[in-house]
Amino acid sequence: MKKKSRKLSVLVMTGLTLYAANGFSMPAIKEDYTCPIGKEKFSSFDYPPQCPTNKFVMFKNEFTKEELKKYEKIINSKEYKAIPQNLPKEYYLGRFYEMAGGFSDKEIGETYYKAYIAQINENFENANTLKESLAKGISYLEKSLPMENKSEFPWKLAYLYISNKEFDKANALVEKQDKNVHLERIANFYYTLSDIEKSQIDYYGYDYMDFNKESIDKKTKKEFREKALYYLQDVIKKNKGRYSEEELFRLVDLYKSLGNEKAIDEVFSKAPSEYWSLIVSYYLDEPIGSIGDVYDEKKLATENNLKKALSYADKLVKMISKNSKDSIEKNQYNLSIILKAEAERRLGKFEEASKTLSKINLADVKDTLYDYDFKILKERINKKDISVGQYIPEPIRY
């Protein structure tokens, strides 16, 4: 059973989890441009834009007459015109920077990094320029070391090392950074390499990459997960045991990827009550705000995990007063009831689920974001239906 879910985001406010409609989207703006060399008029969504005919990349807003005279000679040269037409603008810009001179190793290296990433994400089929972008990105960024600004983190060079299977170099570069300044970035770097986050391919048909994921073998991926866990634990220690929602579930995901289910239960047992509703959803494998849909319908939550979900949902219901006049607490109470009834439904405890759901005052959920979940849940309970659907988030609109 598949259905497209309403996409809801979770707001955590003063320890309370609320639903909020995610109707926010940012449309891309197509702008009109005039190429400073040749005066060709064109429209583009991109920044910096690239002139369609002569392939000049407008890497800044204004150019002097002297610059344009120099740059015109470059883009009209045989070398520049020999660049394959279907390559990303970042590759053109990297070559341009080299030919023009006057640009730093860091600028050129970062541009080739972007050219490499554009090629692997947009499936350009030019193996030579792909290898060239990777090699030049590494070469120029290595020459830019050490970084003058100690607050900067060498993400791009580290990702290029990973893409080139130079894992020892990546580790050495990242782990020698000042941990008093970059500990969170180090933890985040290794978490990104762990390949734990749910792929966007199943949802949107693509999965944007900051590095070539295919370069990492199974053994190395496990090592990165162990490092990610180690540094994330250090971050939490640094913060005296406090952690954000993101850090909590990254910790849990890492334990799961390393096969340590017991550690997950221990982490959750010590988690503040503000995270209980999210813990229920974790054990159900259901996104908050999408009751009855699961992340993976081919690998459903075990009966043991459903029981754990019910346990936390029960604690949540008992903690919150039904008679509170505070609208936020009323919303949280209704959420806790829905989560508990859902856990009972998934366990086939339909009589208990019906009794639990009856505790909600219909007037409190009518014409609210809970209305849909309440009606669907009630219908499934009445039908003694334990089925679930595959969660499919709405695509992001630009």
Image (spheres, rainbow, N blue to C red):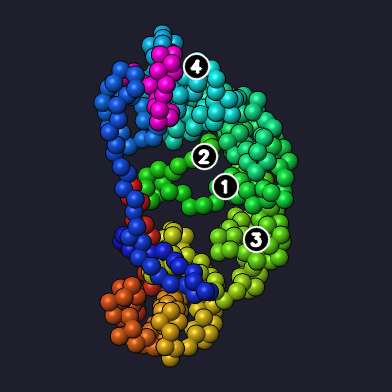
Looking at the image, residue 130 lies above or below residue 396 = above
The mark nearer the N terminus, 2 or 1, is 1
Q: Is residue 386 left or right of residue 159?
A: left
Q: Is residue 189 left or right of residue 95?
A: right
Please, what is the three-letter code of the amino acid marked with disc 2?
Answer: Asp
Q: Which mark is residue 192?
A: 1
| Contact, mark 2 vs mark 1 (Cβ under 8 Å) | yes
| Tag 4 residue | 100
Q: Residue at x 49, y 75 (%)?
A: 16
The secondary element bearing badge 1 is classed as: helix
Q: Residue 345 is drawn in which quadrant?
A: bottom left
Please, what is the three-letter code of the amino acid marked with disc 4?
Answer: Ala
The secondary element bearing badge 3 is classed as: loop
| Contact, mark 1 vs mark 4 (Cβ under 8 Å) | no
The mark nearer the N terminus, 3 or 4, is 4
The mark nearer the N terminus, 2 or 4, is 4
The secondary element bearing badge 2 is classed as: loop
Please, what is the three-letter code of the amino acid marked with disc 1?
Answer: Thr
Q: Is residue 68 magenta?
A: yes
The secondary element bearing badge 4 is classed as: helix
Please name which of the two marks, 1 or 3, marks the residue nearer to the observer. Answer: 1
| Tag 3 residue | 260
* Image coordinates for residue 9, horizontal then vertical, percent: 41, 64
Residue 318 is at least partly visible in this image: yes
Q: Residues within 10 Å of mark 1 (few under 14, many from 20)?
A: some
The mark nearer the N terminus, 2 or 3, is 2
Q: CA distance from mark 2 to mark 3?
A: 28 Å
* Image coordinates for residue 86, horizontal then vertical, percent: 36, 23
The mark nearer the N terminus, 1 or 4, is 4
Q: Nearer the viewer, residue 333 or 153?
A: 153
